[in-house]
Image: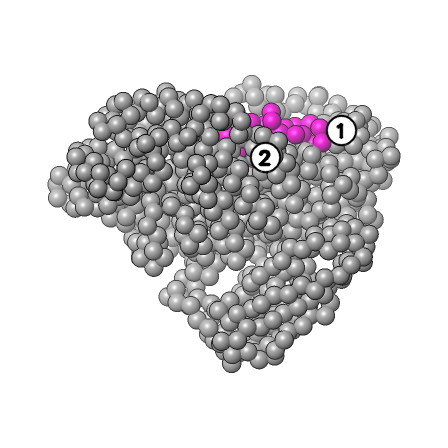
């Protein structure tokens, strides 16, 4: 539709119709399947609001979306189509590893392809907008939503923001893209104590330096939509934070797209103690330039009152409606309200062979080998190998936020391994979780389902026995263990980051048998593995690896592929260290290299200050040496560039994908700086018995930092440059900036 016609259409709309465009409801109002997560209190929504509603949450599938579209267009006075928005977070039907695993690939180009195919599948099913990427910087593994983020580093997350947004949106021109709605603006990952929905309170320099860059990268990459955070930031709920939404997002960064609340977050302004009632909440949100109210009654029931009593200028509503209509127009919905979706296209698109192939490749690169004592991996399939554990045959490998994925389509670990050892003996050994209270509290399972998940005590004892008997007869035991899918993800905060006690117990028993043990961990977060490392030989962090998880795991443990994943989130030694992350600020009494000795340094009495596995860490088969770190200058000016090179030599018979990481430290600055900051990385293949010179170029603007007013500063002085395999294993050289 021409802009002129769209303007005419808008002029012809009643205030009620306009407000309807700013309301988003979920499936239950449209007699469609509702797969959204969140509280489901009565909303006080009238039939008229349903009929005028502008967008719908988490109804997907070509048949459903087409049917609902027909109905809505028939009842909307101007036959305006609705937009379908959905949580397509790490794949639609073909599910990839969770984003924390995608982060661990350090392979943005491959991740981009993943987002392209997710967009192809989702658009074929009628989805217009995907609620991703989630770009919250994550520092605290207690928070369940670390699963959804690429990790703890702002530079790396910004790179992923770019490929995820463009991966979704590039196809829009060709008819197989979706709009990217990045989230949760802003700073949700900083929730205090890792407790879900808790407050976020941080210095401005921290916010600008560590939390905002990835969202900004999403804006710069053309993301057409942003979702606010459920939390407050420095005392102001993000959903109504005028400074954040207007000053930063719209004015400073030039964001022209739509801002949507998170699920019920306008209503929750009342619970925050920020708004008196629904009308007040609506006022505060629209004044902050928030366009669409997701799943709350505030805009539907409040905006008209605000205009009628003169508290709100209707122009504010018009601006928001214009943004919504413009996006519908840009997507061509006035011409094709089905967005090119059809049952036939959907059938052809979803889970096609090429998509599964990519999911397998992403899972292979996401998995991180944390330990491989005595080179027990790769497994020699001619030995007596057994597969034991609750995840051995379980298909729950998709993780909580794969809301459209079908676990029946996923390849289990047993199925993957059987391609190498068709008759491998398998025992479950124990349940994933035996914590009835926790499973009940999740509110997702019926009593019958829980009874199915938790075996009777007698059965559990038998399962244990059978597993131990099997282990005794074996040379190598593969243990498939981990968290329940619903323990990680939204509302999955935990204070105990160890494997469940029943699984630890089984590991203990099997470790006494003196067998080679390979532990596969399925989890949505860094777990505390300190008490396990001595009990097993090899550990592979497999995350929730997605649809092709079982195949990818098998290819790695039998040596068809070489593990290459590297952590993007620190693995703590003890939960009491959380939040723990590599780019923490320097302190006056550092744990290492302090002028003090013994007690009076920044450390713990009962645990090391260092993590178990640092950011960037991961092992591969074979060995490489990093040497000859060279800087082409010792002193650079603000207009210069610094050229850095390092020699990476593969001394083994394995081809290795190396992730060479470049960090720096600003030695003296007017605001205390991190001990290290990642500025660049390269993932390169170094074939067996060969070496490569890897080069980087550093420009002075990469050395800038934010002050407490959000201004970028470049200060001359001395810097240390680090290049290495991970954040704690680096070579270093100094240089100065004049
Ligand atoms: C989550 C969002 C999600 C939304 C819609 C909320 O609970 O915080 O990330 O996109 O629900 O499902």
Report the magenta residues as a range. Answer: 392-416
Mark 1 vs 2, N-terminal side: 2
Residue 147 visible: no
Alpha-carbon span between mark 1 and mark 2? 22 Å
Q: Is mark 1 within 8 Å of ligand 1?
A: no
Position in image of residue 228 (x %, y %): 37, 46
Q: Main secondary structure of the magenta part?
A: loop
Is 184 placed above or below 702 here? above
Q: Residues within 10 Å of mark 2 (few under 14, many from 20)?
A: many
Identified at 13% across, 39% down, the residue is 308
Position in image of residue 618 (x %, y %): 69, 52
Identify the disc placed on residue 330.
Answer: none
Left or right of residue 644, residue 717 in this image: left
Left or right of residue 533, residue 64 in this image: left
Pointer 1: what residue? 418
Magenta span includes 412: yes
The residue sitting at the left extreme is 309
Q: Secondary structure at mark 1?
A: helix
Closest to the observer, 430 or 729: 729
Is 217 placed above or below 41 here? below
Displayed quadrant of residue 254: bottom left
Pointer 2: what residue? 355
């Amino acid at each position: 539709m021409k802009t002129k016609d769209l303007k005419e259409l808008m002029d012809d709309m009643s205030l009620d119709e306009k407000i309807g465009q700013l309301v988003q409801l979920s499936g239950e109002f449209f007699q469609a399947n509702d797969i959204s997560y969140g509280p489901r209190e009565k909303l006080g929504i009238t039939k008229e609001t349903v009929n005028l509603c502008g967008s719908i949450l988490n109804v997907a599938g070509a048949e459903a979306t087409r049917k609902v579209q027909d109905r809505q267009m028939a009842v909307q006075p101007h036959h305006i189509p609705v937009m379908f928005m959905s949580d397509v977070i790490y794949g639609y039907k073909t599910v990839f590893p969770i984003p924390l695993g995608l982060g661990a690939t350090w392979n943005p180009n491959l991740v981009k392809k993943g987002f392209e195919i997710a967009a192809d599948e989702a658009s074929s099913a009628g989805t217009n907008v995907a609620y991703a990427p989630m770009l919250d910087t994550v520092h605290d593994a207690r928070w369940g939503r670390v699963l959804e983020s690429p990790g703890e580093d702002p530079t790396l997350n910004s790179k992923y923001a770019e490929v995820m947004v463009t991966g979704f949106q590039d196809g829009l021109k060709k008819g197989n893209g979706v709009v990217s709605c990045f989230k949760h603006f802003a700073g949700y990952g900083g929730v205090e104590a890792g407790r879900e929905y808790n407050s976020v309170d941080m210095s401005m320099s921290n916010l600008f330096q560590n939390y905002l860059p990835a969202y900004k990268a999403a804006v710069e990459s053309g993301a057409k939509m942003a979702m606010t955070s459920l939390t407050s930031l420095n005392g102001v709920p993000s959903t109504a934070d005028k400074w954040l939404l207007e000053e930063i997002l719209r004015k400073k960064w030039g964001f022209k797209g739509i801002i949507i609340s998170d699920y019920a977050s306008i209503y929750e302004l009342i619970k925050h103690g920020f708004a008196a009632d629904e009308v007040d909440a609506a006022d505060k949100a629209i004044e902050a330039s928030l366009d669409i109210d997701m799943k709350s009654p505030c805009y539907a029931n409040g905006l008209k009152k605000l205009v009628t009593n003169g508290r709100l200028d209707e122009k504010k509503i018009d601006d928001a409606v214009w943004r919504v209509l413009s996006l519908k127009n840009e997507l061509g919905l006035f011409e094709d309200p089905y967005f090119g979706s059809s049952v036939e296209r959907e059938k052809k698109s979803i889970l096609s062979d090429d998509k599964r192939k990519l999911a397998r490749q992403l899972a292979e690169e996401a998995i991180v080998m944390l330990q491989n004592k005595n080179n027990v991996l790769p497994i020699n399939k001619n030995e007596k190998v057994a597969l034991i554990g609750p995840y051995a045959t379980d298909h729950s490998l998709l993780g909580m936020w794969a809301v459209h994925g079908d676990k029946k389509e996923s390849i289990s670990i047993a199925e993957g391994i059987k391609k190498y050892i068709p008759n491998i003996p398998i025992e479950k050994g124990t349940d994933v979780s035996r914590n009835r209270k926790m499973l009940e509290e999740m509110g997702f399972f019926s009593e019958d389902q829980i009874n199915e998940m938790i075996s009777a005590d007698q059965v559990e004892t038998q399962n244990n026995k059978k597993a131990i008997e099997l282990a005794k007869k074996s040379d190598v035991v593969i243990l498939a263990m981990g968290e329940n899918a619903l323990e990680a993800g939204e509302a999955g905060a935990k204070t105990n980051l160890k494997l469940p006690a029943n699984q630890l117990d089984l590991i203990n028993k099997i470790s006494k048998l003196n067998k080679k043990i390979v532990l596969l961990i399925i989890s949505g977060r860094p777990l505390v593995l300190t008490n396990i490392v001595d009990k097993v030989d090899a550990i592979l962090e497999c995350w929730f690896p997605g649809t092709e998880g079982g195949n990818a795991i098998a290819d790695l443990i039998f040596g068809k592929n070489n593990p290459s994943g590297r952590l993007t989130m620190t693995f703590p030694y003890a939960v009491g260290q959380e939040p723990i992350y590599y780019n923490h600020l320097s302190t006056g009494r550092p744990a290492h290299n302090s002028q003090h000795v013994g007690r009076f340094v920044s450390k713990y009495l009962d645990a090391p200050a260092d993590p178990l596995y640092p950011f960037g860490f991961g092992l591969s088969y074979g060995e490489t040496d990093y040497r000859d770190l060279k800087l082409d200058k010792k002193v650079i000016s603000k207009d210069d560039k610094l050229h850095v090179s390092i020699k990476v030599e593969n001394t083994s018979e394995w081809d290795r994908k190396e992730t060479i990481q470049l960090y720096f430290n600003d030695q003296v600055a007017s605001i205390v700086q991190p001990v290290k900051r990642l500025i660049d990385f390269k993932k390169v293949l170094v074939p067996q018995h060969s070496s490569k010179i890897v080069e980087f170029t550093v420009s002075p603007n990469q050395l800038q930092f934010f002050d407490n007013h959000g201004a970028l500063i470049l200060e001359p002085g001395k810097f240390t440059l680090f290049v290495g395999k991970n954040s704690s294993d680096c070579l270093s050289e100094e240089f100065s900036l004049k």
